Image: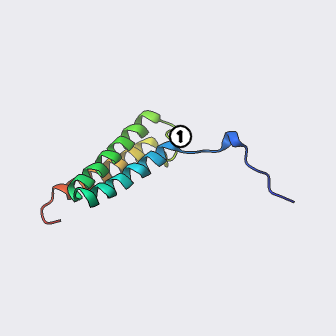
Amino acid sequence: MTPALPDPAERHTAPALWLVVLALAGGAVTSVTVGARAGSLVVVGTLVLAAVARLLGRGRRPEGIAVRSTTFDVVLLLGLAVGVGLLLTTTGV
């Protein structure tokens, strides 16, 4: 007996997740080509934009970014952005 194939209408592509992955990869490329400070700024910007998208999306939107409750996701993403931003401004790191 073969397993039932999933309904194509129920298939999730999670475009927001792929945008975040591409932006973070862009941050890595920027770090190598331009410098660590510029790459870190790309990462911080990506995290902030993901938090804003999660806050505006509500519920299970945007797919791929929504993991827990909206509040938890936004606080976590902004906390990570602040952490990277603090490391970015710290001398000697």
Above or below for 57 versus 77: above
State the colouring used for the structure image.
rainbow
Task: Name the spot of residue 53 as percent of width and height, x first.
Answer: 41, 38
* Residue extending furthest toward the front: 33
Mark 1: which amino acid?
Arg
Q: Residue at x 60, y 44 (%)?
A: 12
Check disc 1 and report the residue beneath it.
Answer: 60
Q: Residue at x 48, y 48 (%)?
A: 18
* Residue extending furthest toward the bottom: 92
Task: Name the spot of residue 3 as percent of width and height, x first.
Answer: 80, 56
**Foreground pick, 28 / 41:** 28
Task: Name the spot of residue 50 as percent of width and height, x first.
Answer: 39, 43
Can you see residue 19?
A: yes
Above or below for 55 versus 26: above
* Residue extending furthest toward the left: 91
Q: Residues within 10 Å of mark 1 (few under 14, many from 20)?
A: some
**Foreground pick, 35 / 44:** 35
Above or below for 34 versus 9: below
The answer to whether residue 4 is left or right of residue 37 is: right
The answer to whether residue 5 is left or right of residue 41 is: right
Quarter of the image for residue 45 reads top left
Q: Residue at x 23, y 59 (%)?
A: 36
Secondary structure beneath label 1: loop
Q: Residue at x 65, y 44 (%)?
A: 11
